[in-house]
Image (cartoon, rainbow, N blue to C red):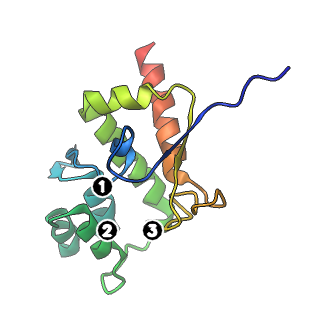
Amino acid sequence: MSAPAPPVINFYSTTGEYGCFSNFSRHPVFVRGKRWPTSEHFFQAMKFEGTEHEERVRLAKRPMDAANMGRDRKRPLRRDWERVKERIMLDALRAKFTQHEELKAVLLGTGNAILVEQTANDSYWGDGGDGSGKNRLGQLLMRLREELRAEQT
């Protein structure tokens, strides 16, 4: 008899029990010597690290503004972005879930659940809306959950 499948927790919006898993959630992070309004601000700004665009993105009024700036290809994307983007996302998540104890508790409280960013808007970081996407954000959150759990023991 096989063990029951772990539960699945879908998230996307900043509202609801798992709204904090969204990079748009209003939880500032302190990373690389600067305070960022959200993990989305940090992630998008790192596409232009070391340029004037980095600070413009950091100062964006809302996370959606930061996201739109980061996706604007009129700004010069750093050459190594595809190679470093997952490490940068993990840095952002690690900062967020270690600098806010209440968020760490929510993440650890998910047990062994499979975390899925459920959105048709993104098939790389999310599940593509139908499970066909890579769900890299959910996978990185699960990896971080394991790291945090290991630190507790």
Please name whichever residue, 128 or 33, is drawn nearer the observer in this view of the structure.
128
| Residue farthest toward the top in the current orientation of the protein | 153
Residue at label 3? 80
Mark 3 Cα-neighbour bin, 10 Å: few <14, some 14–19, many ≥20: few
Q: How many marks?
A: 3
Q: Which residue is mark 1?
A: 24
Where 40 falls versus 143 (above or below)?
below
- x and y percent of residue 145 in the render? 47, 31
Q: Which mark is residue 67?
A: 2
Query: Mark 1 or mark 3, which is nearer to you?
Result: 1
User: Is 139 left, or right, of 41 in this rendering?
Assistant: right
Estimate the x, y position of residue 53 in percent, counting from the top left: 21, 74
As shown in the figure, which amino acid type bears the numbered disc 3? Asp
N-terminal of the two: label 1 or label 3?
1
Position in image of residue 147 (x %, y %): 47, 29
Q: Residue at x 56, y 32 (%)?
A: 113
Disc assigned to residue 151: none
- Which residue is pictured at 43% across the width and 25% down the height? 109
Picture residue at 33% right of the left edge, 59% below the top: 43
**Where residue 65 sits in the image (x, y, percent)?**
24, 70
In the rendered image, the quadrant that contains the C terminus is top left
- Disc 1 secondary structure class: loop
Question: Going from the N terminus, do you reach mark 1 or mark 2 first?
Answer: 1
* Amino acid on which disc 1 is placed: Phe
Distance from label 1 to label 3 (Cα)?
24 Å
Residue 93 to residue 50: above or below: above
Quadrant hosting residue 84: bottom left
